[in-house]
């Protein structure tokens, strides 16, 4: 059986899904229960999807706030659409970006409360809203990496990194991808390595790094992880594509030696 990711990526096979889960199993994760609310308006054709998205965004924001100092306050002068100063949580949610699913490894709907009279919506002009309650598993490395890139965590300086993507092709299993990700994560100039897509034979990694994707790819070809050959297929500043090949293990020199006490066999 195949499935589609929340972000609308391509269908993936059971084997690819299993490899994806195995890769994510090595990622620091936490579960957050979150309420998602979407106002029902003429422009919102899929209020349930919007509510689920809001639940995932809320979970990511909750995790981010727990990583920040208790006395964190956003910069002065930041205001919302209503002209009022943004709360710390609202400011952080904006800075986490437009796609909250990059921080989630999986989620499940605990309650689908559906369409109801507006209670939670901030927009007073809305009569109805759609509400869901979701349990969201979050990739804390991805959240922490984003906060560090914003200069909100110790060791991170705003603007010192850049978000780049590395497309990895030629995958026969999750093992070479895990080796590649470990090698990238060990690089001092790479703050975070987040898997964002895995389909049959292909994966996409999102990195927060101090240099471009093309340079990272080139370095992997010169210093590949053990057991891998890495070839650059396409390179650019913000995205590069590499082809990985697993190398055959060297022959065991003892394999051809006769066992103790055994006589060589003549052909």
Image (spheres, rainbow, N blue to C red):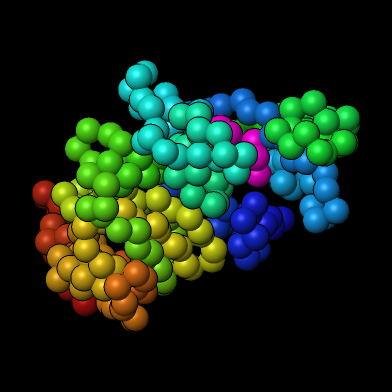
Is residue 55 located in the magenta-colored stretch of the structure? yes
Measured from the top left, where is residue 38 in percent x and y?
74, 40
Can I make out residue 18 in this image?
no
Measured from the top left, where is residue 246 in percent x and y?
31, 67
State the image quarter where residue 183 is shown. Answer: bottom left
Q: Nearer the viewer, residue 28 or 61?
A: 61
Q: Nearer the viewer, residue 223 or 28?
A: 28
Q: Which residues are magenta?
A: 53-59
Measured from the top left, where is residue 43 in percent x and y?
80, 56
Please, is residue 19 above or below residue 69 in the view?
A: below
Measured from the top left, where is residue 114 in percent x and y?
85, 35
The residue that appears at 25% across and 67% down in the rendered structure is 212
The tally of labels here is: 0
Q: Is residue 114 left or right of residue 197?
A: right
Q: Quadrant of the C terminus?
A: bottom left
Please, is residue 119 above or below residue 22 in the view?
A: above
């Amino acid at each position: 059986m195949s499935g589609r990711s929340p972000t609308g990526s391509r269908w993936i096979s059971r084997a690819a899904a299993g490899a994806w889960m195995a890769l994510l199993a090595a990622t620091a994760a936490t579960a957050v229960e979150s309420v998602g609310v979407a106002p029902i308006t003429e422009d919102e054709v899929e209020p349930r999807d919007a509510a689920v998205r809001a639940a995932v965004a809320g979970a990511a924001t909750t995790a981010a706030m727990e990583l920040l100092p208790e006395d964190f306050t956003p910069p002065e002068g930041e205001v919302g659409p209503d002209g009022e100063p943004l709360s710390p949580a609202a400011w952080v949610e904006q800075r986490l970006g437009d796609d909250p699913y990059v921080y989630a490894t999986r989620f499940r709907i605990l309650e689908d409360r559906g369409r109801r009279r507006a209670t939670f919506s901030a927009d007073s002009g809305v009569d109805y809203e759609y509400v869901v309650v979701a349990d969201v598993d979050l990739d804390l490395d991805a959240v922490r990496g984003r906060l560090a890139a914003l200069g909100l965590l110790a060791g991170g300086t705003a603007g010192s990194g850049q978000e780049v993507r590395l497309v990895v092709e030629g995958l026969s299993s999750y093992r070479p991808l895990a080796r590649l990700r470990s090698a990238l994560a060990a690089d001092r100039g790479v703050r975070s390595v987040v898997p964002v897509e895995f389909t049959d034979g292909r994966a996409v990694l999102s990195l927060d790094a101090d240099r471009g994707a093309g340079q990272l790819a080139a370095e992997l070809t010169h210093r590949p992880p053990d057991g891998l050959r890495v070839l650059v297929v396409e390179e650019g500043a913000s995205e590069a594509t590499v082809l990985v090949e697993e190398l055959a293990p060297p022959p065991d020199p003892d394999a051809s030696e006769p066992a103790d006490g055994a006589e060589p066999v003549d052909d």
